[in-house]
Image (tube, helix red, strand yellow):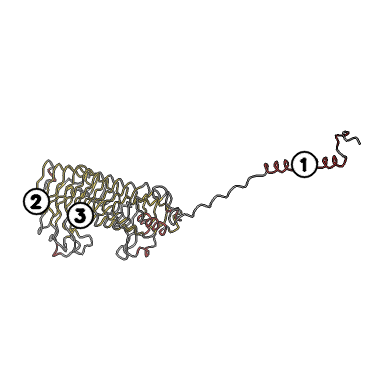
């Protein structure tokens, strides 16, 4: 038997080896195909974790603690009541530990009475760039004011926007029958600033500052019709260290009035008119009134107002108080009625008794009128009408040269119970005793 032919292997063995080799080839090919298929298959990405839900109030608060009333749901259509949203923005801002801002963006927002009460945790700014419209649904005010700020320190109200009281709808109504709201009230505010904004057509006073100290009112525009009743631009009472500067005011009442209990008041660079001028008083109306002292009105212009710079006290004053150290300086009158006036016979309601005539219990002393020039629409350019019970004393007319602009009369000064001196003053006006 020849064992060396054909490699010495039998046919059955060669067949088995051939089959095994083919199986290996097939397995290899399948593995290659599977690997290729796996390479083309997209890799599943791990799902991102959902973002945490914002905390309450976080949606309205952006960088720097800004509480935007529109992000709280306020609608700027001038018709939808946004009181709730603005009140919510104040609550969040006042409760913030750091400085926070209530933002009224551009647009018109109808609101009812607002109460911004402190004390707050941090400093608060109210940024008004849009227009706030005061509702004309009068019962909502319930005899109170519109925007009330109470017991807040380090407050700033600023912006390019407007506080519109929409008072033209109530000016023909009887103010005695229903109390109308002031537009902006600062009660017990310490270290505050109101700047840049416009106040328009208040139903009553535009700004009322009461029991406050260290407040600046800067670069405001305050406007109401000349025949609108009781629409004082800025009223200050029982307050100290109040500075009003750079304002343009035209209303139907006093541009600025300074009431009892006020001291260290500075009014500078104010343009007034129309209106009833810049006044100290009226004084002596209330039993709890306090003295007025250290008031300076300087570098102002009055245009076509029904009074110029004025001190007014009730002739039947219910309490004896004193108004002293009052200075009116560098004032220009442009066709103003009664440019300089002290009136201790003031009785606007005409209910004073004949017995009380010239019996004012208010003392007026140490008053300086210096460098007051221009024109008067009334022959009486100076009227110093003081009480025979409490004559005015220490009144100085220095460089006062205001002349009647009409042609049917001459410039005159009228003085009654007024004691003081006149220097470098138009001779016709030097009527002091």
**Which tag is nearer the camera, tag 1 or tag 3?**
1
> Which quadrant of the view contains residue 36?
top right
Q: Is residue 360 visible?
A: no
Q: Secondary structure at mark 2?
A: strand
* Mark carried by residue 24: 1
Q: What percent of the width, then of the height, locates residue 63?
A: 41, 47
Nearer to the camera, 211 or 280: 211
Q: What percent of the width, then of the height, locates residue 361?
A: 13, 60
Kindly identify which residue carries mark 3.
262
Q: What percent of the width, then of the height, locates residue 13?
A: 85, 41
Relative vertical location of residue 75 with respect to residue 16 in this rendering, above or below:
below
Kindly identify which residue carries mark 2.
419
**Which tag is nearer the camera, tag 3 or tag 2?**
3
Whether tag 3 and tag 2 are in contact, CB under 8 A, the answer is no
Q: Residue lying furthest left in this view?
A: 433
Q: Secondary structure at mark 1?
A: helix
Residue name at image x 14 percent, y 48 percent: 413
Relative vertical location of residue 87 with respect to residue 422 in this rendering, above or below:
below
Give the mark nearer the N terminus: 1 vs 3: 1
**Which tag is nearer the camera, tag 2 or tag 1?**
1
């Amino acid at each position: 038997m020849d064992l060396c032919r054909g490699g010495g292997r039998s046919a059955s063995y060669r067949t088995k080896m051939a089959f095994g080799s083919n199986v290996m080839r097939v397995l290899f090919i399948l593995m290659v195909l599977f690997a290729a298929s796996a390479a083309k298959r997209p890799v599943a990405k791990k799902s991102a974790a959902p973002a945490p839900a914002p905390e309450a109030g976080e949606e309205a608060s952006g960088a720097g603690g800004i509480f935007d009333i529109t992000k709280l749901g306020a609608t700027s259509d001038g018709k939808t009541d946004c009181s709730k949203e603005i009140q919510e923005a104040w609550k969040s801002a006042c409760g913030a530990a750091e400085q926070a801002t209530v933002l009224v963006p551009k647009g018109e927002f109808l609101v009812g009475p607002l109460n911004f009460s402190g004390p707050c945790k941090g400093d608060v700014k109210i940024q008004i760039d849009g227009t706030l419209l005061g509702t004309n649904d009068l019962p909502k005010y319930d005899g109170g004011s519109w925007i009330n700020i109470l017991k807040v320190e380090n407050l700033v109200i600023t912006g390019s926007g407007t506080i519109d009281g929409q008072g033209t709808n109530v000016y023909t109504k009887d103010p005695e029958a229903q109390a109308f709201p002031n537009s902006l009230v600062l009660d017990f505010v310490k270290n505050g600033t109101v700047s840049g904004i416009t106040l328009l057509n208040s139903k009553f006073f535009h700004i009322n500052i009461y029991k406050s100290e260290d407040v600046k009112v800067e670069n405001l525009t305050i406007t109401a019709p000349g025949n609108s009743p009781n629409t004082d631009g800025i009223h200050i009472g029982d307050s100290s260290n109040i500075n009003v500067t750079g304002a343009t005011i035209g209303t139907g009442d006093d541009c600025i009035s300074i009431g009892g209990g006020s001291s260290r008041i500075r009014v500078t660079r104010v343009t007034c008119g129309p209106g009833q001028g810049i006044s100290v008083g009226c004084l002596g109306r209330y039993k709890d009134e306090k003295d007025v002292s250290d008031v300076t009105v300087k570098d102002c212009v009055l245009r076509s107002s029904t009074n110029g710079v004025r001190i007014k006290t009730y002739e039947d004053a219910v309490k004896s108080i004193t108004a002293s150290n009052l200075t009116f300086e560098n004032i220009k009158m442009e066709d103003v009625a009664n440019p300089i006036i002290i009136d201790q016979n003031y009785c606007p309601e005409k209910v004073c008794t004949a017995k009380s005539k010239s019996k004012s219990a208010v003392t007026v002393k140490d008053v300086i009128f210096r460098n007051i020039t221009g024109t008067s629409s009334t022959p009486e350019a100076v009227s110093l009408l003081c009480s025979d019970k409490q004559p005015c004393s220490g009144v100085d007319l220095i460089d006062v040269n205001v002349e009647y602009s009409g042609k049917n009369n001459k410039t005159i000064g009228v003085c009654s119970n007024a004691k003081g001196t006149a220097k470098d003053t138009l001779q016709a006006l030097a009527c002091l005793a």
